[in-house]
């Protein structure tokens, strides 16, 4: 493991943002935590902080060279019953950039090292208090933007997901033991067991497939569902983008081809976190830039959860628009914009389109709230079972897909090649252990804790 992950260092960090607020927190963890506290803190009533009991709170002052820096409370949590499993001291100061930085610097001068992002949680993992799924759950809690992702993250932290994986691992390891005992024996002798193995394996594959599918949807709950405005140039995509967000975010003009790049904004609608995307109008490739914009639009359209296909009420549909509508039916809403103007759309044609339609005007705002309701309705199809627990990160998802692929191959090989089946099952189990972070690996730590915040 790299030097950076040295558990012998005592680490310190701000745990709150250095700004004007009621209180700010500085966290210290490691062998020298109590010693550092004793050096920077003067208790109001004389006592030896090094000998303080665990889970105690002490009132006093942080002092530097005899001068008071702030009036504070400090809490003491002794190893192993602390967040990191090491001695932990937290200093509660009045919050402001100057005071927080000064107290942190005093702790550093007294022997601590500045913590890396996520290093406190990393210690909790390395010292065995939590597994990697739970560490990621802690990060998910602070990233949660809606009630649903918060509840999911808490379930992952409670260990629901780890337990589920452990049950798969247990079954697969039992299977490995049976197979190992059978290898070398004539195939006929293990005919009976093979049937059992196949049944259990199919069951696990089914459950993992369900989990992987739900988890893909779950990612959208964390990252936001992509709702993409697309359509011919000048139909009013950017005007609708502004109308839905209720602000003049992007440029709108009578010129065709105004929008040259995709523009994305996050917003909440009916409890969902959405990423609304405005795209360059389809069908123009007059120059290099337009061609580039087109390719980007096409890519974004492919990744959309919901497509808002915008058409102009005041002009008839082109052949390309009709083709586009019919080839994107599964996840689209047809938005008939400019309904404040006289219609030029053919009613028989519009009646036969099998996509939900809504008439709006970005100019008068008519129909915008109906459009929003339709978006929410489409999204409700992606609701997940509230009692289930899903995978909490892309890392977990990728490993699960790999495990799944090994399990499927193992099932195929079961009929004619037990050796190969054995190794494939073993590879799948290894992937499941990796999700839990059973093997401590520096690259994985780097990847997981990189996007934690400072002091976490
Ligand atoms: N009357 C009327 N005009 C609208 C409406 N929505 C947009 N427009 C006008 O249509 C023109 C094009 O609007 P944009 O929002 O720039 O259209 P766009 O689809 O983003 O166009 P590109 O970015 O060029 O593809 C502008 O002049 C808008 O003012 C509407 O509901 N009613
Ligand atoms: Mg535009």
Image (cartoon, grey):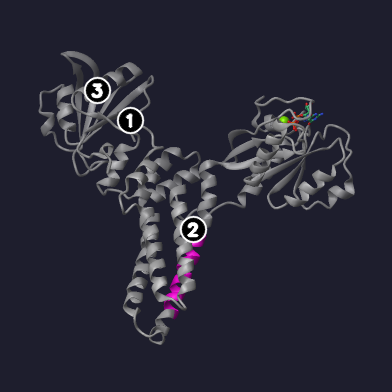
Mark pair 1, 2: CA separation: 34 Å
Percent position of residue 17, x then y: 38, 26
| 412 lies above or below 52 | below
Chief SS of the magenta region = helix
Percent position of residue 166, x then y: 36, 61
Which image quadrant is residue 165 in? bottom left
Bounds of the magenta segment:
195-210
Which image quadrant is residue 142 in? top left
Q: Secondary structure at mark 2?
A: helix
Point out the image quarter for the C terminus.
Answer: top left
Quick check: is 136 in the magenta stretch? no
Point out the image quarter for the N terminus.
Answer: top left
Quickly name the residue at label 2: 211
| 329 lies above or below 358 | below
Quickly name the residue at label 1: 15
| 367 lies above or below 132 | above
Percent position of residue 189, x then y: 38, 86
Instruction: Residue at 64%, 41% (x, y): give it.
Output: 227
Ligand 1 occupies quarter: top right
Mark 3 or 1, nearer chain start: 1
Which image quadrant is residue 93 in? top left
Quickly name the residue at label 3: 72
Q: Is the distance from the Cβ of mark 1 to the nearest ligand 2 atom less than 8 Å?
A: no
Q: Nearer the observer, disc 3 or disc 2?
A: 2
Residue nearest the viewer, comparing 395 with 67: 395
Instruction: Residue at 38%, 50% (x, y): give it.
Output: 133
Task: Judge the density around disc 1: few (<14), some (14-19), many (≥20) Cα neighbours within 10 Å.
Answer: some
Number of labels in the image equals 3
Instruction: Residue at 28%, 40% (x, y): give it.
Output: 2
């Amino acid at each position: 493991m790299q030097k950076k992950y040295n558990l012998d260092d005592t680490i310190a960090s701000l745990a709150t943002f250095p700004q004007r607020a009621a209180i700010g927190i500085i966290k210290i963890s490691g062998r020298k935590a109590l010693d550092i506290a004793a050096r920077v803190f003067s208790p109001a009533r004389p006592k030896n902080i090094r000998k303080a009991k665990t889970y105690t709170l002490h009132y006093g002052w942080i002092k530097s060279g005899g001068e008071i820096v702030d009036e504070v409370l400090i809490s003491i949590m002794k190893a192993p019953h602390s967040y990191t499993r090491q001695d932990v001291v937290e200093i509660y100061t009045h919050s402001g950039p100057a005071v927080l930085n000064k107290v942190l610097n005093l702790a550093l001068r007294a022997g601590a090292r500045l913590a890396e992002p996520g290093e406190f949680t990393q210690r909790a993992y390395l010292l065995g208090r939590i597994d990697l799924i739970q560490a990621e759950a802690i990060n998910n809690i602070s990233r949660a933007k809606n009630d649903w992702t918060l509840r999911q993250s808490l379930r992952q932290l409670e260990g629901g997901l780890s337990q589920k994986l452990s049950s798969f691992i247990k079954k697969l390891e039992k299977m490995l033991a049976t197979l190992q005992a059978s290898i070398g024996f004539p195939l006929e002798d293990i005919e009976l067991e093979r049937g059992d193995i196949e049944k259990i394996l199919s069951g696990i594959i089914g459950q993992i497939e369900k989990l992987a599918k739900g988890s893909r949807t779950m990612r959208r709950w964390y990252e936001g569902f992509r709702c993409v405005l697309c359509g011919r140039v000048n139909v009013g995509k950017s005007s609708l983008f502004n109308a839905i967000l209720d602000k003049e975010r992007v440029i709108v003009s009578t010129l065709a081809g105004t929008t040259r790049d995709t523009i994305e904004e996050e917003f909440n609608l009916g409890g969902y976190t959405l990423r609304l995307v405005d795209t360059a109008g389809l069908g123009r490739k007059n120059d290099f830039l337009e061609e580039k914009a087109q390719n980007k639009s096409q890519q974004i359209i492919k990744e959309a959860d919901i497509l808002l296909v915008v058409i102009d009420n005041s002009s008839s549909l082109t052949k390309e628009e009709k083709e586009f509508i019919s080839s994107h039916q599964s996840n689209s809403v047809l938005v008939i914009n400019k309904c404040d103007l006289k219609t030029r759309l053919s009613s028989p044609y519009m009646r036969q389109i099998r996509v939900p339609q809504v008439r709006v005007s970005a100019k008068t705002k008519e129909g915008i709230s109906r459009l929003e309701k339709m978006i929410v309705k489409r999204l409700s199809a992606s609701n997940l079972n509230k009692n289930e627990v899903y995978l909490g990160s892309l890392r977990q998802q990728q490993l699960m897909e790999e495990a799944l692929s090994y399990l499927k191959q193992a099932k195929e090989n079961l009929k004619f090649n037990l050796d190969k089946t054995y190794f494939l099952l073993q590879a799948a189990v290894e992937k499941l252990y990796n999700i839990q972070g059973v093997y401590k690996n520096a690259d994985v730590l780097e990847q997981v804790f990189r996007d934690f915040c400072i002091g976490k």
